[in-house]
Amino acid sequence: VQLQASGGGLVQPGGSLTLSCAAPSNIFRGNIMGWFRQAPGKQRVIVARITTGGITWYEYSREGSLEGRFTISRDNTNNMLYLRMDSLKLEDTAVYYCNSVPADLNSWGQGTLVTVSS
């Protein structure tokens, strides 16, 4: 069973999006969950992760930590993962995926495309 990420789209620089991920309970429950992204021509990298208790960690970009622009959260009752993205930049353009951390290699979904463009 694959994870289903949704909520991507076309947004202007400085705009906001909230991504959602519906996860199977066998992957979600009891595991650290994360958002990953893969920009065109680049490898997939982790963006943020969150423990079952809500402790969060964010990746660093060239401009510093994504914390402050990105907010990861989870709904442990409904096995849902979220990523709120504010002040989006051109370099945030990528396909965004959700998965456990470490990732369940058999459960990558198709991701959701975020395009930041003016």
Image (cartoon, helix red, strand yellow):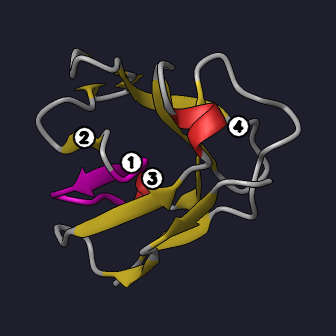
Q: Residue at x 76, y 36 (%)?
A: 43
**Which amino acid type corresponds to the residue marked 4 in the rendered image?**
Arg
Which mark is on residue 73? 2
Circle nearer the viewer, 3 or 4:
4
Relative placement, left or right, of 91 versus 98 is left
Earlier sequence position, callout 3 versus callout 4: 4
Say which of 84 and 89 sits in front: 84
**Which amino acid type corresponds to the residue marked 2 in the rendered image?**
Ser
Mark 1 lies on a secondary structure that is: strand
Circle nearer the viewer, 4 or 1:
1
Instruction: Name the outermost residue toward the left.
Output: 68
Earlier sequence position, callout 4 versus callout 1: 4
Q: Which residue is mark 3?
A: 91
Q: Quadrant of residue 74?
A: top left
**Which amino acid type corresponds to the residue marked 3 in the rendered image?**
Glu
Which mark is on residue 44? 4
Measured as percent of width and height from the top left, residue 39 is found at: 64, 51
CA separation in Å, label 4 and label 2: 20 Å
Mark 3 lies on a secondary structure that is: helix
Q: Residue at x 19, y 72 (%)?
A: 15
Circle nearer the viewer, 4 or 2:
2
Earlier sequence position, callout 3 versus callout 1: 1
Earlier sequence position, callout 2 versus callout 1: 2
Earlier sequence position, callout 2 versus callout 3: 2
Chain part drawn in magenta: 78-89
**Which amino acid type corresponds to the residue marked 1 in the rendered image?**
Leu
Measured as percent of width and height from the top left, residue 38 is found at: 66, 47
Q: Which residue is mark 1?
A: 81
